[in-house]
């Protein structure tokens, strides 16, 4: 089965074929954060889904060139810096840094390009100039420039809106608006005193770009006029992505993006997690409560991206115990083999399981199916280990299969080594055990646990496991 994705534009599952005649390179644009605050884990659901998409395409042999923009000038960032009385660049830098730290904690692969909108204002002005020459952009009495919607009859097609049925609302200057108020949207916003010192010179006087033109300019500047895939959360479909299509296609005359993929929301008690609703957690909030980035990644990535996902702490606990199962299995296989051993061919029963993981993902990133395949593989190979059917070379081959799967999931436990203090306590405990001093041995086990490690006594001697990885 070829890889196929649900395209928001056609509302159909479509076989994936990149524009590249060699069928290898994929141009992927993903709308990034507005850096006016710490991103919440709802935002990160979008970035983790896009990471799964990129990693799966790479596992299938594609070379993905990805752009994720940083919106560092818009209505919200300007409001934020004005409230604090600091310069825009100083205000946004803190949130840019935090964003990259969070991406690292969530193991999201770095895009090749993270353009910041403020570095592309010249390209935005150029696009607006072309639109003006074509009679599509016009300057209104408020000195701002707007996109003349009547010039682009396709507006609304991505969101499947029938514009004729909606009441036009004239012009809209704010970056975000509802479907009910379809109107000419702002391309360039003339400076006013609420903007403070945030302004750029332009052929139309001082001002700043609208949010939508930012993405059109950065996408086409870095990836060219045609993208393979464009992603974002469903809330971006209207008006943001509609506007991106309208602006880009009117300037370039080419189809802007072939596949539009949108993730459903992360919800809390039936409501979208959002800054404005006040029902959000940042990654930092969760790390401070003792959860790890790996656990949050697991909870966000393992629900199919087009299904709403309800955020709960039970869900995080489930992620912790599932990762514990995976860790134990990987550790067991590693114990059963040695680095010098050449892997055997993977026996058919396990090879099928590994392949099924990837074919499930070919089906519009069906991650819940794929995770089912992984846990079947874990169960079957654990049973085979129990009954002594697996030799060291087969264990090595299963680990190779896991490494392929993990290149997409990014779940592998970080290698952690116990400190000399922990090792000394383990040695003391061995002596206590040899002398049958059981209470002392238990005391030492607790002391080791207090340092974050669990001792397991096996026939080959004591084994140490990091406590965070032993399940709840
Ligand atoms: P923003 O910074 O608001 O532009 O959002 C950045 C990305 O996060 C966009 O792709 C949004 O669609 C997405 N997003 C925002 N809230 C949620 C949510 N609760 N669940 C999933 N994605 C979201
Ligand atoms: Zn965008």
Image (cartoon, rainbow, N blue to C red):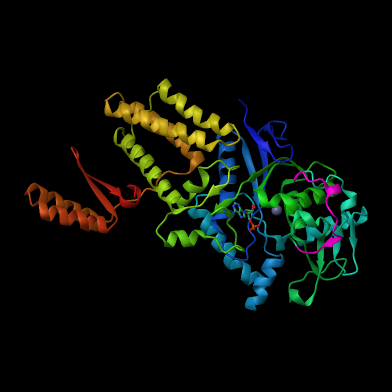
Q: Which residues are magenta?
A: 158-174
Task: Name the residue: 49% across, 41% down.
Answer: 409
Write down the quadrant of residue 157 in the picture.
Answer: top right
Task: Name the residue: 62% across, 49% down.
Answer: 112
Q: Would you place residue 249 above or below residue 444 in this image?
A: above
Q: Position of residue 224 (x, y in %)?
A: 76, 46
Task: Name the residue: 19% across, 52% down.
Answer: 426
Q: Would you place residue 119 above or below residue 406 in this image?
A: below
Work out whether residue 315 or residue 414 is closer to the camera in this orientation and state it: 315
Q: Position of residue 345 (x, y in %)?
A: 41, 23
Point out the quarter of the image occupied by ligand 1.
bottom right
> In the rendered structure, does residue 340 fall within the stretch colored magenta?
no
Q: How many marks?
A: 0
Q: Position of residue 260 (x, y in %)?
A: 70, 42
> In the rendered structure, does residue 173 fall within the stretch colored magenta?
yes
Q: Is residue 159 visible?
A: yes
Work out whether residue 87 or residue 382 is closer to the camera in this orientation and state it: 382
Q: Position of residue 163 (x, y in %)?
A: 83, 48
The residue lying furthest to the left in this view is 435
Work out whether residue 68 or residue 454 is closer to the camera in this orientation and state it: 454
Q: Is residue 424 visible?
A: no
Q: Which image quarter holds the N terminus?
A: top right
For the stretch drawn in magenta, what is the main secondary structure?
loop
Q: Would you place residue 276 above or below residue 297 in this image?
A: below
Task: Name the residue: 21% across, 58% down.
Answer: 447
Q: Is residue 66 left or right of residue 319?
A: right
């Amino acid at each position: 089965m070829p890889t196929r994705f649900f395209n928001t534009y056609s509302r159909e599952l479509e076989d994936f074929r990149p524009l590249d005649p060699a069928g290898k390179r994929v141009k992927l644009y993903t709308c990034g954060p507005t850096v006016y605050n710490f991103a919440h884990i709802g935002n990160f659901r979008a970035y983790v889904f896009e990471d799964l998409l990129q990693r799966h395409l790479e596992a299938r042999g594609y070379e993905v060139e990805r752009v994720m923009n940083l919106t560092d000038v818009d209505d919200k960032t300007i409001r934020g810096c004005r409230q604090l009385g600091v310069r825009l660049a100083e205000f946004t830098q803190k949130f840019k840094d935090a964003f990259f730290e969070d991406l690292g904690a969530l193991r999201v692969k770095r895009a090749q390009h993270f353009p910041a909108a403020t570095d592309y204002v010249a390209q935005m002005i150029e696009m607006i100039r072309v639109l003006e020459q074509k009679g599509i952009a016009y300057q209104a009495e408020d000195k701002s420039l707007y996109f003349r919607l009547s010039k682009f009859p396709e507006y609304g097609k991505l969101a499947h809106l029938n514009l004729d049925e909606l009441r036009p609302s004239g012009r809209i200057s704010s970056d975000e608006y509802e479907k009910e108020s379809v109107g000419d949207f702002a391309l360039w916003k003339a400076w006013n005193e609420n903007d403070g010192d945030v302004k750029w010179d332009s052929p139309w006087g001082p001002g700043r770009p609208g949010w939508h033109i930012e993405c059109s300019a950065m996408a086409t500047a870095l990836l060219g006029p045609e993208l393979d895939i464009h992603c974002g959360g469903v809330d971006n479909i209207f008006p943001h992505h509609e506007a991106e299509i309208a602006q880009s296609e009117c300037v370039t005359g080419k189809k802007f993006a072939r596949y539009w993929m949108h993730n459903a929301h992360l919800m809390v008690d039936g409501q979208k997690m959002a800054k404005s609703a006040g029902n959000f957690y940042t990654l930092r909030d969760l790390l401070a409560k003792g959860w790890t980035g790996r656990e949050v990644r697991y909870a966000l990535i393992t629900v199919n991206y087009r299904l709403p996902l309800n955020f709960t702490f039970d869900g995080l606990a489930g992620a912790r115990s599932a990762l514990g199962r995976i860790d134990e299995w990987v550790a067991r296989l590693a114990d059963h083999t040695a680095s010098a051993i050449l892997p055997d061919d993977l026996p058919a029963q396990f090879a099928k399981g590994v392949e099924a993981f990837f074919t499930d993902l070919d089906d519009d990133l069906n991650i819940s199916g794929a995770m089912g395949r992984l846990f079947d593989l874990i169960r079957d190979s654990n049973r085979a280990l129990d009954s002594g059917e697996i030799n060291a070379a087969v264990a090595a081959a299963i680990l190779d299969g896991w490494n392929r799967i993990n290149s997409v999931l990014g779940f592998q436990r970080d290698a952690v080594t116990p400190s000399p203090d922990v090792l000394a306590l383990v040695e003391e405990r061995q002596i206590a055990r040899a002398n049958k001093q059981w209470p002392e041995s238990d005391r030492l086990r607790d002391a080791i646990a207090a340092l974050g490690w669990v001792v397991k006594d096996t026939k080959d001697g004591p084994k140490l496991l990091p406590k965070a990885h032993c399940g709840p």
